[in-house]
Image: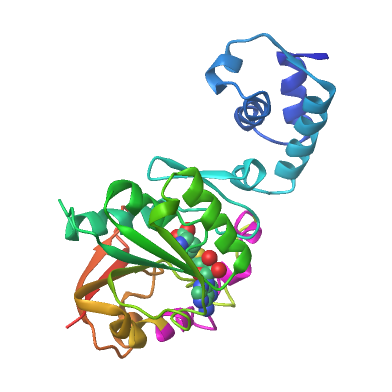
């Protein structure tokens, strides 16, 4: 057992060049206690293993790894999701897709059939399954490793019995029609320089060709084959893609583009005819 004083912890924060706030957050995670509890303590009791883990996590954070990847968890729409090096960390802007879905299916008690295309952690589809207790969701991803995290999260959130998992290159292995297809596909141009933290997300979750539009060029022209009549396609888009997406040919009609809090058109809703 090792006793670490607040002063020693502050020194560790300085050595690893990390804010004291994040250092406390990491210690709280390791000790499995509330951050606020540690905040008011003057010293902390750690096992030798805890102390080693603390130094390991601080050094990973010092190299730029996001806290979410170190803890292997990230909150999305008030739910916690496991995230690893094989999955994109859920982003707050993607919560807009959930709000949009709710707007179009408000009070829906039907057995909605949803396709979460490019599921990653499964944060979109699993959140919808939590919010719509009669819905069913098919999760598809090209990455087997990502899909296994989707499954873990589905189990953790107790929606496994309403989940199906398909490894698929977009629609390649999908053979039915849905009430809604919802997707946050990769949309970063390959030339774009990523910030230090985003480098920890898998490349396949980020990049979509030289203009960032490759995934949309696959999804949009094909989606009508996988939607029931009046079915909806909800897509997240990048900050400069609202006009470009209108140029992609599709049998769907564009109903609406939703802006995020920064005023950027961030999500589109299409309807099948
Ligand atoms: C931007 S991430 C979104 C993950 C998750 N839905 C979210 O919103 O946090 C895109 C996901 O699409 C998957 N993906 C990339 N190319 C794909 C393809 N050709 N077919 C199916 N999924 C693909 C990636 O593996 C990744 O999980």
Residue 59, by quadrant, is top right
- Rendered-image quadrant of the N terminus: top right
Q: Residue furthest front?
A: 161
Is 260 above or below relative to 54? below
Residue shown at 46%/79% (left/top)? 170
Snapshot quadrant of residue 206: bottom right
Q: Is residue 147 visible?
A: yes
Residue 230 at x, y percent in the picture: 17, 75
Image quadrant where residue 23 sits: top right
Q: Is residue 79 shown left or right of residue 10?
A: left
Q: Nearest the camera: 162 or 261?
A: 162
Could you tell me which residue is drawn at 63 percent across and 10 percent down? 41
Please indicate whether residue 236 sits to the left or right of residue 21 in the image.
Answer: left
Residue at (43% x, 81% y) in the render: 171
Residue 188 visible in image? no
**Which of these two is toward me, 31 or 15?**
31
Q: Is residue 116 magenta?
A: no
Residue 217 covered by magenta stretch: yes
Q: Is residue 257 above or below residue 215?
A: above
- Residue 259 position in % (x across, y down): 27, 61
Between 143 and 199, the residue placed more toward the observer is 143
Please give left or right for residue 27 compared with residue 135 in the image: right
Q: Residue at x 58, y 59 (%)?
A: 148
Location of the C terminus (image quadrant): bottom left
Image label count: 0
Q: Position of residue 220 (x, y in %)?
A: 35, 83
Check the image and report above or below for 173 versus 158. Answer: below
What percent of the width, then of the height, locates residue 224? 28, 84
The range drawn in magenta is 197-218
């Amino acid at each position: 057992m090792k006793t670490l004083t607040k002063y020693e912890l502050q020194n560790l924060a300085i050595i690893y060049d990390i804010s004291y706030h994040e250092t406390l957050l990491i210690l709280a995670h390791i000790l499995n206690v509330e951050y606020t509890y540690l905040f008011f303590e003057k010293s902390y009791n750690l096992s030798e293993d805890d102390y080693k883990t603390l130094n390991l996590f601080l050094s990973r954070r010092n190299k730029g790894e996001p806290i979410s990847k170190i803890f292997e968890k990230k909150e999305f729409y008030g739910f916690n999701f496991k995230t690893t090096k094989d999955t994109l960390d859920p982003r707050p802007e993607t919560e807009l897709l959930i709000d949009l879905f709710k707007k179009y299916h408000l009070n829906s008690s039907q057995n909605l059939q949803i396709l979460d295309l490019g599921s990653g952690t499964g944060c979109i589809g699993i959140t919808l399954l939590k919010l719509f207790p009669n819905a069913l969701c098919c999760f598809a991803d090209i990455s087997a490793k990502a899909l296994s995290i989707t499954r873990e999260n589905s189990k953790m959130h107790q929606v496994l019995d309403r989940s199906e998992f398909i490894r698929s290159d977009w629609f390649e292995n999908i053979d039915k029609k849905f009430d809604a297809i919802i997707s946050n596909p990769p949309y970063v141009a390959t030339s774009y320089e990523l910030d230090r933290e985003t480098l920890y997300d898998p490349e396949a979750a980020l990049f979509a060709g030289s203009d960032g539009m490759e995934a949309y060029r696959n999804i949009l022209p094909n989606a009508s084959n996988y939607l029931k009549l009046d079915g909806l396609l909800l897509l997240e888009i990048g900050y400069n893609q609202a006009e470009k997406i209108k140029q992609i040919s599709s049998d769907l009609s564009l109903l609406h583009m939703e802006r995020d809090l920064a005023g950027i058109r961030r999500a589109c809703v299409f309807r099948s005819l």
